[in-house]
Amino acid sequence: MRRHISDEDLSAWVDRELPSAEFSRVEQHLKSCDRCRMLERELALMTQAFRSAERLSLPPAVWPRIESALQASFPGEQVKRRFDWLRWPQFAISARNLAFAMVILALLGGLVTVFEYRMLRQNEIAAIVEIDRAHTELVAYSPTEYNPFRFSIGKSFESNPFAQKGLMDNANPFRPLLGNR
Amino acid sequence: MGGDRKVGKLVEGARSGNVAAYQSIYEQFGARIFNFLFRLLGSREEAEDLMQQTFLIALKQIGTLRDAEQLESWIFRIARNEVYQRFRKKKVESLDDKALETDARQFEEPRLGANPERMLLNIELGEVIQRVLRGLPVKLREVFVLAVIQNMSYQEITKIVGRSLLSVKTDIYRARKHAREELRKYLSRQSDLGSRAEQR
């Protein structure tokens, strides 16, 4: 004689809480067993009746009571209201922070500018020193031959800015090196 | 997933003391908790009272909640504890089935008045349900309300009542059996009353 489904399993079946293997077994059994099917129907109807019972909606009086009790238990600043972020003291603190940040940024900007200027100036001085060093070396090597503008004197007099009339003697820094040329 | 993220944000807001987050939590879970309390206690006034108590505790202690996803079952657990405390206050010495059953039967017994037959015939489904629930020991009543009325999964119920899955399954079955007997008694009483009324 085949075994009926236990009432406990039928109860879990009605709640769709049986594991899948058990579920198939119960499903198959119910197709062929009148006794279990009737019991299952009865449990399902009862469940449906209980589930269809009126659901009470949220009582309106409770939340205000909870809110005031919360306010009483967290005195002062701990309970933040919906638009608290717009309130003056908080906003004032933000403005102060903003001003502070701007001052810090301006100071940092000034420092960077001064540093960059000093770096440029140092590079410029280094370049002048280097030119001077090269020039001194070349002059020492050939005091009569060295003239950076000499190549243009022979070809086009006009291309040498220092060879122009009236400027040659005064404006050419290499003039003393040119001798009688 | 989206719902979980929303609950997570609400919990985060409530932890930082944001009253709008408190209110959203109350609005989201309040109705289910209130119905649970009402079905366990059988009195609207008492359910409102414990509802306030439950949410006050939950919102004050929300910082202790470790997993935001467990918020609902956590609030249910608080509500359940409050119900048990209420029963204890009502001079219930122990929480074993027998004592609670006695208590449940004493709890808000319907006043039948001068014309009990007529009154019983006029009882609506909601009242029948409350009568059946009152007849259940609290241990069975709570799982019955959660599984059958609130349509919660057995797994969720284990988290609320703190019992094993097997124990929850058995208790739900026992509660169903009990409820079925109560319903049968009620229906046969009703049909007796109906036939007596016809004989007159």
Image (tube, rainbow, N blue to C red):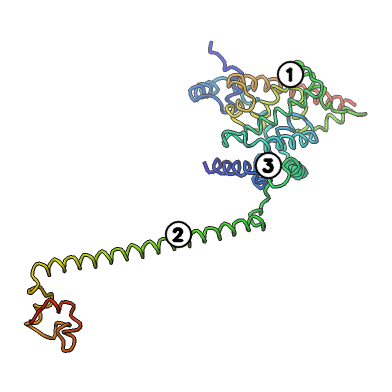
| Tag shown at residue B191 | none
Residue located beneath label 2 in the image: A108
Most extreme residue toward the right is B114
Query: At label 3, which amino acid type do we have?
Result: Tyr
* Label 3: which secondary element: helix
Most extreme residue toward the bottom is A165
Q: Position of residue B134 (x, y in %)?
A: 77, 25
Residue located beneath label 1 in the image: B95
The span from disc 1 to disc 3 (Cα, nearest Å) is 29 Å
B185 or B55, nearer to the observer: B55
Q: Residues within 10 Å of mark 1 (few under 14, many from 20)?
A: some
Look at the numbered discs 3 and 2 and tell me whether their residues touch, using CB distance below 8 Å: no
Disc 1: host chain: B
Answer with the quarter of the image where residue B58 lies: top right
Disc 2: host chain: A
The span from disc 2 to disc 1 (Cα, nearest Å) is 71 Å
Asked if A35 appears above or below A156 in the picture, the reply is: above
* Label 1: which secondary element: loop
Disc 3: host chain: B
The span from disc 3 to disc 2 (Cα, nearest Å) is 50 Å
Residue located beneath label 3 in the image: B26
